[in-house]
Image (cartoon, rainbow, N blue to C red):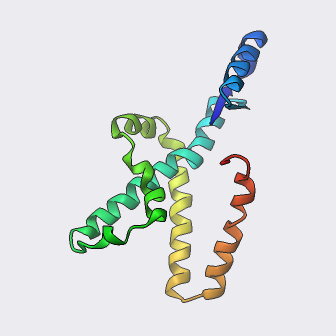
């Protein structure tokens, strides 16, 4: 787990050190950010967008399931892990999404652009670019190495 401290310069240095020690004692990593805006921007991409994607994938499958009764019989661990966040409480996430609306809308625009690009590659049967897109995106495992272990 990661703990984020924003604007640490506004807090007493000794108190910040105590809080960091507390979080370290429960095996949490502490990240410092200059501002709440920086926090909100980054969290929109790595947390909020993940939740929205999970909710909307779940919604898409539920809508198809009305006609395809066996769709859940085929759902494997990949589907389960992808929609796991869709089990989150809407009472928790609705105000969070609305509070960070500015950055979430920007992240959604960029995500939708990538989905549309991938859709076009599929329509064009552009096998090389489909492969290259996924191959280039595999770099994320190097970035996440150590974070998810």
The quadrant in which residue 118 appears is: bottom right
Q: Residue at x 76, y 16 (%)?
A: 17
Q: Residue at x 37, y 47 (%)?
A: 87
Q: Nearer the viewer, residue 26 or 121?
A: 26
Side of 5 where 103 appears, left or right: left
Side of 45 where 28 appears, left or right: right
Of the 4 image quadrants, the one containing the N terminus is: top right
Q: Residue at x 64, y 30 (%)?
A: 3
Number of marks in the rendered image: 0
Above or below residue 14? Residue 92 is below
The quadrant in which residue 131 appears is: bottom right
Q: Position of residue 6 (x, y in %)?
A: 67, 26
Q: Nearer the viewer, residue 117 or 24?
A: 24
Q: Position of residue 27 (x, y in %)?
A: 68, 30
Side of 23 where 102 appears, left or right: left
Q: Position of residue 106 (x, y in %)?
A: 54, 51
Q: Residue at x 64, y 73 (%)?
A: 134
Q: Nearer the viewer, residue 118 or 136?
A: 136
């Amino acid at each position: 787990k990661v703990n984020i401290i924003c604007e640490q310069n506004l807090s007493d240095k000794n108190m910040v050190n105590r809080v960091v020690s507390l979080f370290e004692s429960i095996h949490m990593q502490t990240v410092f950010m200059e501002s709440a805006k920086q926090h909100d921007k980054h969290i929109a991409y790595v947390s909020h967008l993940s939740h929205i994607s999970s909710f909307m994938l779940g919604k898409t499958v539920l809508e198809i399931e009305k006609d395809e009764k066996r769709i859940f019989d085929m759902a494997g661990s990949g589907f389960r892990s992808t929609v796991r966040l869709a089990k989150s409480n809407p009472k928790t996430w609705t105000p969070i999404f609305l509070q960070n609306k500015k950055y979430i809308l920007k992240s959604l625009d960029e995500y939708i652009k990538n989905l549309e690009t991938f859709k076009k590659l599929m329509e064009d049967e552009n096998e090389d670019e489909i492969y290259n897109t996924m191959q280039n995106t595999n770099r994320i495992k190097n970035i996440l190495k150590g974070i998810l272990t």
